[in-house]
Image (spheres, rainbow, N blue to C red):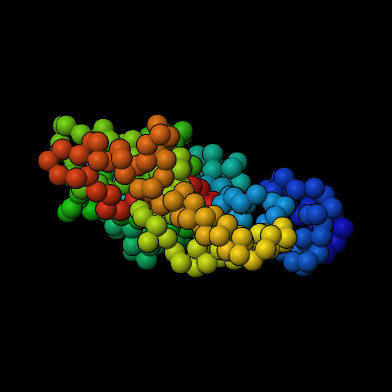
Amino acid sequence: MSNKDLLDNIKKLREMTGVGFKDCKVALDESKGDIEKSIEFLRKKGIAKASKKMSRTASEGLALVKEKNGQISIIEINSETDFVAKNQDFINFCKELSELNFVAKSDLKKINDSKMKNNISVKDNLINLIAKIGEKITIRRANYFDNFSGKNFFYVHSAIEKGIGKIISIVKLDGIVEGKNEEIGLKIAMHIAASNPLAIDKDNIDQTLVNKELEIIKAEIKNSGKPDEMADKISKGKISKFLNDNSLISQLWIMDPKKKVSDVLESHSLEKKIKILDFVRYKVGEGV
């Protein structure tokens, strides 16, 4: 790695972790320049604070949502820079793609093979757009929520246009009575956008993520010099907090932190208990 690349990576690592120059350099040397491994190294040393954002590289682009007859679709299209994300050709391409995504029920293969208004397939139009704009553009992911069970709600944070933004959440709820307690649907979607849960409840959080977090917690405690029996007790408390913080129904309600999401669902239940059936949250570029 050249000196310039090393300095660039140190700068990036400092911005992501808030750790000093020297420690960032040591972490990068230990991990052979790998940013994600460097963050993990720093966390294990107890230097960097735990943050889901730290290990993720931001990318640009747009997320788009379409709703019709209670059905909702969402799609994310990535570009390399925010400049391109504001380009009208790119925006028009994304809008048409959102319409096709709804029809294809978020089947990416069907979307790529679909014909656009110019009678050319999506995949060929994508190649043409890349050639015209000069940046890598990818159709990253898509989800579709049917209207067979439950009721769907969505929220676009800081919408650029109707149904277009950088953070979009969708939630499917059972137990909603039309015209009586529907307002909770939008509020739950807003909560999801703000709090970024990993699963509906702690039992559904990916065990790989839980194991990784536990490994980091144990290493951090061990490096702090605490005895094994105390380390074991502390790690159990910390992993319990991690599970509660990242499971939707156990999270503190963003509009009243004295309550949990489960409490809010119960207080808004009428004819039957409101239950979260499914949800998704897109933040453009997250995890890329």
Nearer to me, 96 or 186: 186
Nearer to me, 286 or 91: 286
Depicted 227 relative to depicted 163: above or below: below
**Residue 245 horizontal/vertical position (percent):** 47, 49
Q: Residue at x 59, y 42 (%)?
A: 82
Does any portion of residue 92 appear in the rendered image? no
Q: Is residue 32 left or right of residue 146?
A: right
Q: Which residue is drawn at 27% across and 41% down?
A: 265
**Residue 14 horizontal/vertical position (percent):** 74, 48
**Residue 188 horizontal/vertical position (percent):** 34, 40
Q: Residue at x 48, y 42 (%)?
A: 166
Q: In this view, does 11 lie to the left or right of 197?
A: right
**Residue 88 horizontal/vertical position (percent):** 50, 39
Depicted 173 relative to depicted 255: above or below: below
Q: In which quarter of the image is the N terminus?
A: bottom right
Does any portion of residue 172 appear in the rendered image? yes
Q: Quadrant of the C terminus?
A: bottom right
Residue occupying the far right of the picture: 3
Occupied quadrant, residue 163? top left
Q: In this view, does 79 lie to the left or right of 245?
A: right
Nearer to me, 242 or 173: 242
Q: Residue at x 44, y 64 (%)?
A: 206
Disc count in the image?
A: 0
Q: Is residue 62 left or right of residue 215?
A: left
